[in-house]
Amino acid sequence: MNKVAVFGKPGSGKSTLSKALAEKTGLPLYQLDNLVYQANGDLVPREIYDQAHADIVSSEVWIIDGFGPIGSFYQRLAAAETLIYVDLAYATSYWLVTKRLLKGLFVKPEGWPEGSSIIKGSWQSYKTLRLCPMFWNQDFHDKLQAYSADKQVYVIKTMAELKQFVKHYDKLNSRISLK
């Protein structure tokens, strides 16, 4: 495991999982929100993001946490050796975004871009969650299934699985079912 892509809906615990996985494996962690957004919450110019993303994806080792622009997302999936899809129920994701918002009023959330507004970011997360079924659907699951022929693919569907994943990652020798 040298190149790991961690992705899923907003508020699904990707950043927390990625940080723990990076600590356990020693792989460098790149959180896309820090590449996509400036400290004031504005988007980084696309050409700057694209170059930074290309540099990371072409390196030998990485964990990349997040989604980013769709084109770079599919580049990342193609380059990764391990895909970790955090596919929690929508109600759980909405709750976790709300929990992050409330906690974020006092402490910067895990993986949150420095200086970005927790309120503005949470509002964007709610809007994105509402649109997610158009992307995170059976068609995407079928694409992910095709990747499983030559990559390790993990689909995490519950909070219990999320909590156990890093703890037991080194013991996982087979692919988790995509059903």
Image (cartoon, grey):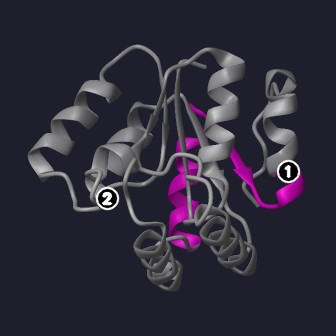
Residue 160 point in image, percent of width and height: 90, 54
Residue 74 point in image, percent of width and height: 36, 49
Crowding around mark 1 (Cα neighbors within 10 Å: few <14, some 14 to 19, many 20+) is some
In the image, is 169 to the left or to the right of 119?
right
- Chain-order first, disc 2 or disc 1: 2
Q: Is 134 located above or below residue 62 in the figure?
A: below
In the image, is 162 to the left or to the right of 130?
right
Crowding around mark 2 (Cα neighbors within 10 Å: few <14, some 14 to 19, many 20+) is few
Q: Is 95 located above or below residue 72 in the figure?
A: below
- The type of residue carrying mark 1 is Glu
Report the number of discs: 2
> In the rendered structure, which segment of residues is drawn in magenta?
138-161
In the image, is 71 to the left or to the right of 10?
left
The answer to whether residue 84 shows anywhere in this view is yes
Residue at figure coordinates x 20%, y 44% from the top left: 49
Q: Is 131 located above or below residue 117 in the figure?
A: below
Quarter of the image where the N terminus is located: top right
Quarter of the image where the C terminus is located: bottom right
The answer to whether residue 153 shows anywhere in this view is no
Q: Is residue 47 magenta?
A: no
Residue 57 point in image, percent of width and height: 34, 29
Residue at figure coordinates x 67%, y 54% from the top left: 13
Residue at figure coordinates x 56%, y 74% from the top left: 137
Q: Name the residue under label 2.
A: 70
Element at badge 1? helix
- The type of residue carrying mark 2 is Ile
Residue at figure coordinates x 53%, y 78% from the top left: 129
Q: Is residue 140 magenta?
A: yes
Residue 152, numbered label? none
Question: Which is nearer the eye, 178 or 33?
Answer: 33
The answer for how far apart the CA atoms under marks 2 and 1 are is 27 Å
Q: Mark 1 points at which residue?
A: 161
